[in-house]
């Protein structure tokens, strides 16, 4: 199992900016233990705590980003999971294109000559087609996660979070497709993408 201190560090990277409770919740870790780990990580210069718009939280430093990738690479080599994660990333990329296209269609619905008209969600058939696409992508994600978890258990949980967001979206809560600050379909997907490229030490492609 992945070391809890590494999970705390990696959770900060995936979340971008989050308080201790959210960092702990990301991998279902004990909050007090995570708080202690975060203080140790701050002492090492790998994370920093700051306040923004009335909220406070943790974020990764450049040194922390490098250390996260070093520790993840060490974990890959120790577990022999590199080939499995690399294969999963290869399978992920075409799905990523489909997800980004679906999110774009959720946000925009061409009207007349305006190809970039905002989707006001009044066309139920349009939205239903997008949601069907997201559901199909979610089924593929299920297979992908199963392969990843077989190699590294810390990859578990993306499918359940994605499916929960999709269910809310189907129920009429539109922001659960692409909203920020919540576990929307898009946010969950982007975190998985970041998880894969961080684990493999890759750079995110433009537009992805």
Image (tube, rainbow, N blue to C red):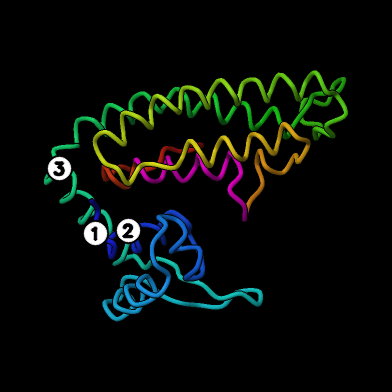
**SS at mark 1?**
loop
Relative vertical location of residue 104 with respect to residue 196 in this rendering, above or below: above
Pointer 1: what residue?
3
Residue at the spot of label 3: 79
Name the one closer to the observer, 62 or 43: 43
**Residue at screen point 34% across, 63% down:** 9
- Residue nearest the viewer, comparing 182 with 180: 182
Distance between the alpha carbons at the discs numbered 1 and 3:
13 Å
Q: Residues within 10 Å of mark 3 (few under 14, many from 20)?
A: few
Residue shown at the point (43%, 64%) measured from the top left: 24
Residue 102: image location, x then y, percent: 63, 27
CB atoms at circles 2 and 1 under 8 Å apart? yes
Of labels 1 and 3, earlier in sequence is: 1
Q: Is 182 included in the stretch rendered in magenta?
A: yes
Which region is colored magenta? Answer: 181-196
Label 2 residue SS? helix
Residue that carries the numbered disc 2 in the rendered image: 7
Looking at the picture, tell me which residue is in the foreground, 49 or 28: 28
User: Does 174 sit above or below residue 34?
Assistant: above
């Amino acid at each position: 199992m992945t070391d809890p201190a590494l999970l705390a560090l990696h959770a900060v990277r995936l979340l971008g900016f989050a308080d201790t409770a959210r960092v702990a919740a990301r991998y279902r870790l004990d909050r007090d233990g995570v708080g202690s780990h975060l203080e140790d990580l701050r002492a090492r210069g790998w994370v920093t705590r700051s306040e923004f718009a009335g909220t406070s939280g943790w974020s990764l430093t450049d040194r922390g980003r490098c250390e996260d990738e070093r520790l993840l690479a060490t974990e890959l080599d120790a577990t022999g999971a590199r080939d499995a994660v690399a294969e999963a990333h290869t399978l992920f990329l075409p799905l990523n294109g489909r997800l980004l296209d679906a999110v774009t269609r959720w946000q925009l619905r061409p009207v007349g000559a305006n190809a970039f008209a905002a989707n006001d969600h009044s066309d139920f058939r349009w939205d239903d087609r997008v949601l069907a696409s997201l559901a199909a992508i979610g089924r593929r994600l299920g297979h992908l996660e199963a392969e990843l978890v077989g190699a590294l258990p810390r990859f578990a949980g993306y499918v359940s979070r994605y499916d929960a967001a999709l269910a809310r979206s189907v129920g009429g809560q539109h922001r659960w497709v692409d909203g920020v600050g919540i576990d929307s379909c898009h946010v969950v997907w982007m975190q998985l993408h970041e998880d894969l490229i961080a684990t493999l030490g890759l750079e995110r492609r433009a537009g992805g």
